[in-house]
Amino acid sequence: AAAQAVTPAPQVRYAEVNGVRLQYVDWGGPPGATGLVFLAGLGDSPRAYDEIAPRFAAHYRVIAIARRGHGGSEARPPFDVPTMSADLDGLLDHLGIRRVVLAGWSMGGDEAADYAVRHPSRVAAVVLLDSYDLSSPAYAAMLSHYPVSYDPDPSALTSAAAFRRWWKRTSAPDVPWSPAMRAEVNDLFTVLADGSVRAKVTDSLEAAFITGLMAVHPEYARITAPVLAFQARPDPRTQADPALPDSLSRKVDRWVANELLPWQDSAHARFRRALPAAHVVFLDRTRHSALPFQARERIVREMTRFLAGLPDSAGRAGSGPS
C-alpha cells in the first residue's frame, strides 16, 4: 500500500552513448544502489512501465530506456540486438551503474538475455516478460499467417484521438485505461502540422528491428544470473479487434489456438531445456500487447519475491518495493 501511495515522478532524460542520443525515464533510487533497468517491446515506450518501475525505487536505481528509433531516442542504424546491448552498456557507464537487474518485455527480453551473456559480471538478475527466441523459421511462418494487418489503418492516423482509439481497440480492448497506458500510447506517435499523426516506429524501422531479432538466437543456457520469466497465455476468444467482422474474428481465434499457442509451447519448452533453473510464471488470459497494464500487480508481486531472494549489492538483505 505504501508503494502504491508514494511513488517518485518519472524524469525524462537524455544521454549521448555509443554514437546515438538515447532517451530514458528515470525514477531515481538510493545512491550506489543496484540498477533496475526496464526495456520495452518493439514499437513500445518506456512509459509502459510508469506504474511498475517506481514501485522498486526505494531499493534500486530505476530507469526505463527508449531504444534507438523509439520514443525520443535517435533513429540511427544499425538496429540489431548486439547494438542495443552496446547502447545499454554505454548508458549504464554514463549513469555510473555498476550492477544491474534487467527486466525486458518482448524484444526487450531478447536484449536483456543478450546483455546478460555478454556482461555476466555486471548482471545481478534477468526478468523476461513474455520474451521468446524468434530465430526459428516457425516464427516467421506463424507471423505470415496472421489474418489481419498489424499496422494502423489510415483512419487511425487522422488525429491523435483516432490513434489512441485504434491502439486501445487493438492492443488492450479488455483492459481499462490507466495512466501508464495513456503515457505509453501518447509516446508512440508524432503529431504533424495538419493534425494527422505518424507512428514513430515506421514500417521500415519495424522491419529492420524484426530482421535483427530473427538473426539472433538467444543463448539462454549461457546466462549465469538468476532468471524470472513470465509467459502470457492469451484467451483465443478475446484476442481479435472487437471492430473486426465476425468472419475475421473467427480467423484470428483459430490462428491463436492453432498457431500462436503451439508455437509458444514449443518456444517455452526450448527455453526450459536451456534454463531449467529459471522461475517461470504463467499469466493466463493475458495479452502480449497489454502485458505491463493487464498483469501489473502480478508482475510487481512476483518480481518482489524474486528480487528479495537475491544478494543485495548495497548490503541489505533482499530488495523489493517498500
Image: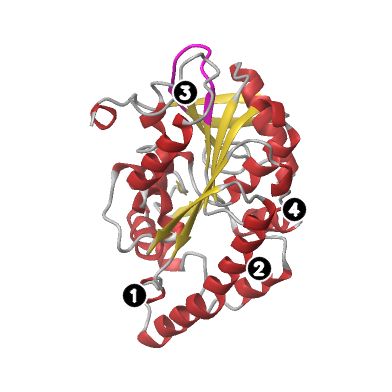
Judging depth in this view, the residue of 298 and 106 nearest the camera is 298
Q: Work out how far the residue at label 3 is from the one at label 1, CA to CA, in angstroms.
A: 42 Å
Q: Tag 1, which secondary structure?
A: loop
Q: CA distance from mark 3 to mark 2?
A: 36 Å
Q: Identify the residue position indicated by label 4 in the image.
A: 216
Mark 1 neighbour density, 10 Å: few (under 14) some (14–19) many (20 or more)? few
Reading the chain from its start, which is encountered first: label 3 or label 4?
Answer: 3
Q: Looking at the image, is mark 1 or mark 2 earlier in the sequence?
A: 2
Residues at marks 1 and 4, CA–CA distance in whole angstroms: 36 Å
Which residues, given as a range, are shown in magenta? Answer: 26-36
* Pointer 4 local density, CA inside 10 Å: few below 14, some 14–19, many at least 20: some
What amino acid is found at the position of numbered circle 3 in the picture?
Tyr
Image vertical order of residue 75 relative to residue 280, above or below: above
- The residue type indicated by label 1 comes to Ala
Mark on residue 243?
1
Q: Distance from label 4 to label 2 (Cα)?
A: 13 Å
Say which amino acid is labelled 4: Val
Numbered mark located on residue 139 in the image: 2
Q: Is residue 237 above or below residue 99?
A: below
State which mark lies toward you, 3 or 4.
Answer: 3
What's the CA distance linking mark 1 and mark 2? 26 Å
Contact? badges 1 and 4 (CB < 8 Å): no
